[in-house]
Image (cartoon, helix red, strand yellow):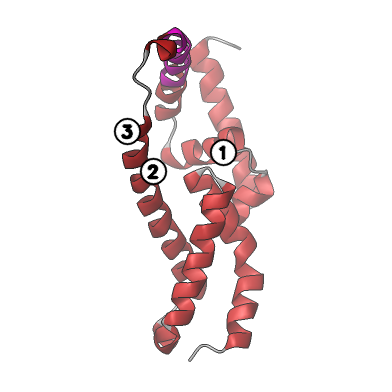
């Protein structure tokens, strides 16, 4: 059974990487903190089943991932109700369309990357995580992250005609 002391040790050991992972998934530090804390509360509430967990690290990351997905779904529903429907918002529509075109072009380029390469590129360039953070989150060496980023940039240069 999980003790208060052991829970504290787990929190101290895994919370920073779980928080980075949740921020990567939901894009908000505040939401990520809530998700990670909820996972630890749930772990404590279900402490009688703790001995059944084979890998606590895998369990924690899976729980954070699942709660993040639920949070994203919930936020998407809320956002659809908040979209402005007035004339003042129409002048911003052109800027939104231009930004959307750029995002679509970038997404098309990123979709041409191999999955692991794309994931590392997004974490580095969009989520602004360091190579060390990416390596820790994905359980890879820093050298592998560097190689995948080099591969992604090489593919981008080739597709964009830059040598």
x and y, in percent, of residue 50 in the image:
44, 84
The label shown at residue 75 is 2
Marks 1 and 2: CB-CB under 8 Å? no
Image spot of residue 40 (x, y percent): 51, 72
Marked residue nearer the N-terminal end (3 or 1): 3
Residue that appears at 61% across and 72% down = 11
Between marks 3 and 1, how big is the CA–CA gap? 36 Å
Residues 65 and 88: in front is 88
Q: Is residue 126 visible?
A: yes
Looking at the rendered structure, the number of numbered marks drawn on it comes to: 3
Q: CA distance from mark 1 to mark 2?
A: 32 Å
Residues in magenta?
Answer: 91-104
- Residue 159's x, y, as percent? 48, 15
Few, some or many C-alpha atoms within 10 Å of disc 3 (few <14, some 14-19, many ≥20)? few
Relative height, residue 84 to residue 46 (above, below): above
Kindly identify which numbered label has been placed on residue 80. 3
Q: List the residue tagged with mark 1.
A: 148
* Mark sitting earlier along the chain (1/2): 2
At x 38%, y 43%, the residue is: 75
Foreground of the two, 58 or 10:
10
Reply above or below: 114 against 41.
Answer: above
Which of marks 2 and 3 precedes in the sequence?
Answer: 2
Task: Classify residue 101 by image quadrant.
Answer: top left
Q: Secondary structure at mark 1?
A: helix
Observer-nearest residue: 99 or 125? 99
- Residue 70: x and y in percent read 36, 53
Give the overall secondary structure of the magenta segment: helix
1 vs 2, front mark: 2
Q: Secondary structure at mark 3?
A: helix
Q: Nearer the viewer, mark 3 or mark 1?
A: 3
Query: Where is the C terminus found, in terms of image quarters?
Result: top right
């Amino acid at each position: 059974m999980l003790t208060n002391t052991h829970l504290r040790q787990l929190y101290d050991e895994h919370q920073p990487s779980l928080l980075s992972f949740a921020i990567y998934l939901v894009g908000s530090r505040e939401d990520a903190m809530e998700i990670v804390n909820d996972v630890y509360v749930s772990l404590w509430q279900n402490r009688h089943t703790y001995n059944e967990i084979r890998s606590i690290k895998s369990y924690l990351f899976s729980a954070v991932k699942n709660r993040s997905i639920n949070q994203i779904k919930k936020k998407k529903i809320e956002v659809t109700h908040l979209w402005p429907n007035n004339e003042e918002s129409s002048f911003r529509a052109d800027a939104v369309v231009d930004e959307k075109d750029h995002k679509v072009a970038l997404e098309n380029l990123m979709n041409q990357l191999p999955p692991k390469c794309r994931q590392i590129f997004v974490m580095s360039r969009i989520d602004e995580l360091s190579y060390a953070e990416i390596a820790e989150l994905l359980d890879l060496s820093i050298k592998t992250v560097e190689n995948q980023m080099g591969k992604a940039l090489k593919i981008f240069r080739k597709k964009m005609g830059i040598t």
